[in-house]
Image: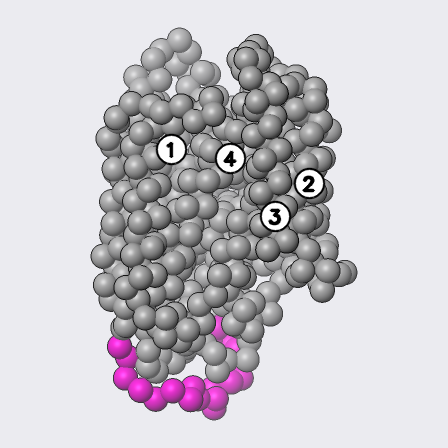
Amino acid sequence: MRTARILTAFFIFLLCASVAFAGEAEEAFHLGEQLPMWSSIPFVGILLSIAVFPLIAPEFWHHHFPKVSAFWALVVAVPLLYTFKGVALHEILHIYIGDYIPFIILLWSLYTVAGGILLRGTLRGTPIINTLMLLIGTILASWVGTTGAAMIMIRPFLRANAHRKYRTYQVVFFIFLICNIGGSLTPLGDPPLFLGFLHGVPFFWTFKIFPHFALASGILLVLFFLIDWYYYRKEENVQPEDKTKLKVEGLHNFLFLAGIVGAVLFSGMVHLGHINILGVKREVSSVIRDVLLVFFGLLSLETTPWEIRKANDFTWFPIKEVAYLFAGIFMTMIPPLAILRAGEHGALAWFISSVRDPAHFFWATGGLSSFLDNAPTYLTFLNTALGRFFAGMPEKQAVHMLIAHKSLYLEAISAGAVFMGANTYIGNAPNFMVRSIAEEAGVPMPSFFGYMLKYSIPILIPTFILITIVFFA
């Protein structure tokens, strides 16, 4: 309740600011051209808080992380509003109304619906079964989204391995494959690809990066099998307690899941004009999508017996944790994203101008997508490529020209944005949710930096270097 009051006060503060700055010219200048690099310090601060507090003050973090998130959000919001007034307010409202609220609605609906699907019975987590589950989830991710696939697969995966002693690496590979790399084949898989679809990239063009997807996922699946086989041999006498036959309960939730996927597709393919919400333009179809997503989530809650969710170890904590932390992350992302969007007119001009070859686009897009929202990062480098090769041409025509003549650049941008979200817990939203669900199930998960130092850097970076050599060198 206390956290709810904090968030309510924060949004009342924004509403009052919107009244105070009513009539200010929102487009007087581009915010990113005015901001210095040190304005990104609060973003680094919230990342360090997520990384350090759970290690040095776990009890404090568990009870007060929403306040820490709100603190960093206010550290950004107050100076921005004081200095840039209406322009800053427009940026803040835009990121919450246009990005954060739809983001949380989608996560909540997928989390709620998937939490009503229960796989009962004996599914023994052998190396072969585990690898097959990861493979199925990786393929599924491109069609129901990385978040949808993660929410469907994580609980059966955890239950299948509940008898295993070493489980941390299993969840980490789950994040690598199902929460990230698996979403690279269609616009439904990951938000940056959906954004590309909205900007003129054909729906099935993303199959162009199937070879990149196959190489990355193939390496990780083989490596997982070998690691799992090694540890399984140490534990092979341990048997799961449940001996019942496999059966699925809450099957009707797959209809709601299909409805969610359909609503997302609808919002990208149907254009019904715009609606103005506190000065932020939103597509009417996007608003309809959000209403439908909430509707399907509520239907799932109403029609699924709570006993199924209880047997699924379903709680609201993971989605609350993501909602609170990303409320702060989205606010603190405003300065670095604005600077990035300013391109060669902002504080990162030296960086943007140095991105020239496909390999540069792969690593620049991926590196920033590891820490920032990968959708605007994708769009920034897509526009960089369009401006470099087809300046002055209408966007959709330029996109088609890029695909026809410089396809490798778009492949690099797409693969970088999707694949490298696996580099950190905040690189993609389901990463954080899966970590939270795994911890609730008793799996000891590495810290923010531990995840990077023990897993993503030694495993993913060599894989991405190989992809660079094979496809982008």
Q: Is residue 108 located in the magenta-colored stretch of the structure? A: no
Quadrant of image for the N terminus: bottom right
Position in image of residue 89 (x %, y %): 58, 24
Give how far apart the Cα atoms at labels 4 and 1 are. Answer: 17 Å
Label drawn at residue 5: 3
Question: Which callout, 4 or 3, points to the residue nearer the camera?
Answer: 3
Q: Earlier in the sequence, mark 1 or mark 2?
A: 2
Residue holding disc 2: 72
Towards the viewer: 222 or 450: 450
Task: Please report the residue visible at 76 percent of the width from the left and 60 percent of the height from the top.
Answer: 56
Q: Earlier in the sequence, mark 2 or mark 3?
A: 3
Q: Is residue 462 visible?
A: no
Residue holding disc 1: 195
User: Quadrant of the rendered structure where residue 123 is?
Assistant: bottom left
Disc 3 marks a residue whose amino acid type is Arg
Residue holding disc 4: 96
Question: What is the magenta range?
Answer: 227-247
Give how far apart the Cα atoms at labels 4 and 2 are. Answer: 15 Å
Left or right: where does residue 211 sit relative to residue 164?
A: left
- Callout 3: few (<14), some (14-19), or many (20+) C-alpha neighbours within 10 Å? few
